Image (cartoon, grey):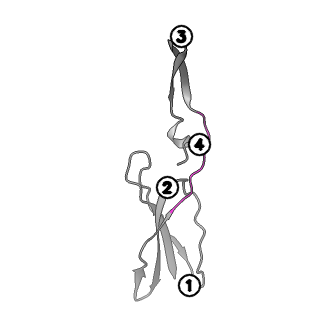
Amino acid sequence: GFSYFCENTAKNDRQPPTQATSYLVDSSTLTAQITGLHPGRTYQCYVTVWNKLGAVTSNGTPLTMAEEPPNAPPQELQATQVQSTSIALMWQAPPEDNQLG
């Protein structure tokens, strides 16, 4: 049979690594669709083939998911007059879950 998994390889606070989940498929299945991945993140994907005598895992192949536009606007927008002809704008980024990349 075969098993496959992808893991998020991000190493920063904004995109923490995810736990890899392995999926088993029978020996006639040679394709898989993996859902639940996140835009803008890089994943390392592996396939393992196994039988009663043992198993061997492929080298990982990296895949970076396409980014998507944020689905929430900047927050807490403030405008302050600096001079009679200029202003300063300040804002907060959208929540991390809404930045999508």
Residue ID for mark 4: 70
Q: CA distance from mark 4 to mark 3?
A: 34 Å
Residue 84 has which mark?
3
Q: Residue furthest bottom?
A: 53
Label 4's element? Answer: loop
The label nearer to you, 4 versus 1, is 4
The label nearer to you, 3 versus 1, is 3
Q: Is residue 91 magenta?
A: no
Label 3's element? Answer: loop
Q: CA distance from mark 4 to mark 1?
A: 40 Å
Res 22 seen here:
no
Q: CA distance from mark 3 to mark 2?
A: 45 Å
Q: CA distance from mark 1 to mark 2?
A: 30 Å
* Residue shown at the point (44%, 49%) measured from the top left: 15
Give the amino acid type for the residue marked by disc 2 in the picture.
Arg
Residue ID for mark 2: 41
Give the amino acid type for the residue marked by disc 4 in the picture.
Pro
